[in-house]
Amino acid sequence: MTAKTFPWTGDSKADALLADNSLALMLGMLLDQQVKMEWAFRAPYLLEQRLGQQLDAGKIAQMDPEKFVALFSDKPALHRFPGSMGKRAHALCEAIADSYDGKPERIWQEAESGEALYKRLRDLPGFGEAKARIFVGIVGKRLGEGPPGWEQVAADWASIADVDTFDRIEEIREAKRAMKAKEKK
């Protein structure tokens, strides 16, 4: 993966993993709900440490799901809801192994259009509309690998895809809060 930078965790090693391993990047996006963005995107680094080997969708898909989920529950837990998110992460790896030969980057590198990329993401476990649109933005803005038309389906709100320095995370968090408050009115 020819990544730019992902200064999203406050930990240089975790940030480097996001740049070097496309599965780590996808797992971080998957986990980015009901926990701070920094924690969600740092979790793949902790998971890799617990596995004792590089994150690999094919190898994870072959693991006993219960043993994999247990890695999410070890202290510190990798998510606020380690059981359900561990199962979802395992399911994501299975889908990537089955549909993309274990190579997450094929999801975007082989998509013919932004709409096709969005559909591929929506078909993955744990990727609803918002996550898929945000990840399209990550692919286009942070990786520079967006297929034609990615801009039309990417999130049109402030998201992690817009974070180019760690200092901007709080700015994005505030924009998210303001958007939610506006939706409640």
Image: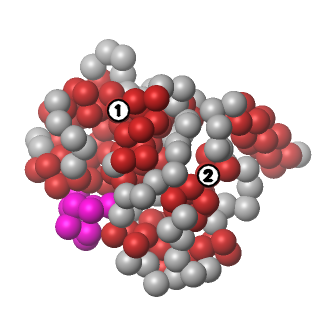
Q: Quadrant of the N terminus?
A: bottom left
User: Can residue 170 be found in the magenta stretch?
Assistant: no
On the question of residue 146 being in view, the answer is: yes
Q: Which label number is shown at residue 54?
A: none
Q: Quadrant of residue 102?
A: bottom left
Up-down relation of residue 52 to residue 139 (above or below): above
Say which residue appears at 38% left-offset and 78% top-offset.
110
Q: Decide which of 61, 16 is in the foreground and name it.
A: 16
Dominant secondary structure of the residues highlighted in magenta in the image: helix
- Where in the figure is residue 118, as x and y percent of width and height? 52, 71
Magenta range is: 94-104
Amino acid on which disc 1 is placed:
Tyr
- Where in the figure is residue 41, as x and y percent of width and height? 47, 37
Up-down relation of residue 103 to residue 152 (above or below): above
- Callout 2 environment at 10 Å: few (<14), some (14 to 19), or many (20+)? many
Label 2 element class: helix
* Left/right of residue 79 with respect to residue 136 in the rendered view: left
Q: Quadrant of residue 107?
A: bottom left
Amino acid on which disc 2 is placed:
Ala
- Where in the figure is residue 167, as x and y percent of width and height? 69, 31
On the question of residue 27 being in view, the answer is: no
- Kindly report the distance in space between the C-alpha atoms of the residues bearing marks 2 and 1: 19 Å
- Callout 1 environment at 10 Å: few (<14), some (14 to 19), or many (20+)? many
- Where in the figure is residue 19, as x and y percent of width and height? 43, 46
Q: Decide which of 27, 65 is in the foreground and name it.
A: 27
Say which residue appears at 43% left-offset and 70% top-offset.
108
Label 1 element class: helix
The residue identified by callout 1 is 45
* Left/right of residue 157 with respect to residue 93 in the rendered view: right
Q: Decide which of 36, 184 is in the foreground and name it.
A: 36
The residue identified by callout 2 is 161
